[in-house]
Image (cartoon, helix red, strand yellow):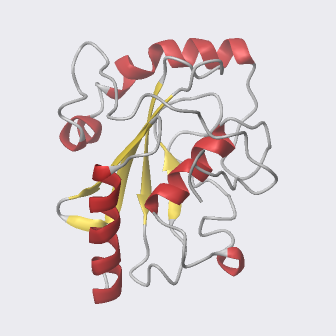
Amino acid sequence: MSASKVALKRLQKEYKAHQADPPPFVWAKPNEANILEWHYIFRGPPDTPFAGGEYWGTITFPKEYPFAPPALRMMTPSGRFESNKSICTSMSEYHPGSWNVAWSVDTILVGLLSFMLSDEITTGAVKSTDAERCTLASKSHAWNITQPKFKSMFPDYATPAMKDLPNMSGAAPKPAGLQGEGKVPGRS
């Protein structure tokens, strides 16, 4: 599937904006062979059960983007989401009626990180204790660097020692409300 001209232009613009000013604890980039397939890394914010963790996932945009929502997945075992399963939020393919064309890659990722910090159960979510999430956080980087796609998408992060993302400061998003809608602190 190839991107429409509108999707291509929009995603190129969003990638440039993301590189210039990524949200705290988030890094993302498109697959060079398919701009509709993006990969992201979350770093677990301090004072959460995910602290010290590194979480890799994908956003798959439809060719109609920004007029239709993407599919969201987390690959890294997290204790919050099933690995490699679609995640239901108001910003995902599960709720096209609530999709807002003004939402961007960064809006989606901050919303997903916010949703990760909540405990709501939905399609693609799992129940775990904070202790289980902390254990998975401590093993997350080691798991990621065994994954060929992670290594090809993020060679700078596929090293024995985990590296900081470009923006490791600032406030983490607040845990999401009912549909996983987070906001970047200090941004509208």
Q: Is residue 73 above or below residue 51?
A: below
Q: Could you tell me which residue is drawn at 60 percent across and 44 percent down?
A: 185
Q: Quadrant of residue 82?
A: top right
Q: Is residue 17 above or below residue 174?
A: below
Q: Quadrant of residue 188?
A: bottom right
Between residue 44 and residue 89, name the one nearer to us.
44
Between residue 16 and residue 98, name the one nearer to us.
16
* x and y percentages locating residue 102 in the rendered image: 54, 75
* x and y percentages locating residue 67 in the rendered image: 51, 84
* x and y percentages locating residue 23 in the rendered image: 46, 44
Q: Is 127 on the left-hand or right-hand side of 25?
A: right
Between residue 174 and residue 138, name the one nearer to us.
174
Report the number of numbered marks: 0
Q: Could you tell me which residue is drawn at 73 percent across and 25 percent down?
A: 128
Q: Quadrant of the N terminus?
A: bottom left
Q: Could you tell me which residue is drawn at 46 percent across and 40 percent down?
A: 75
* x and y percentages locating residue 166 in the rendered image: 32, 34
Q: Is residue 143 above or below residue 109?
A: above
Residue 1 in view here: no
Q: Is 117 on the left-hand or right-hand side of 150?
A: right
Q: Could you tell me which residue is drawn at 58 percent across and 47 percent down?
A: 186
Residue 116 in view here: yes
Can you name the residue that lies furthest to the front here?
186
Q: Quadrant of residue 37?
A: bottom left
Q: Is residue 44 above or below residue 162?
A: below
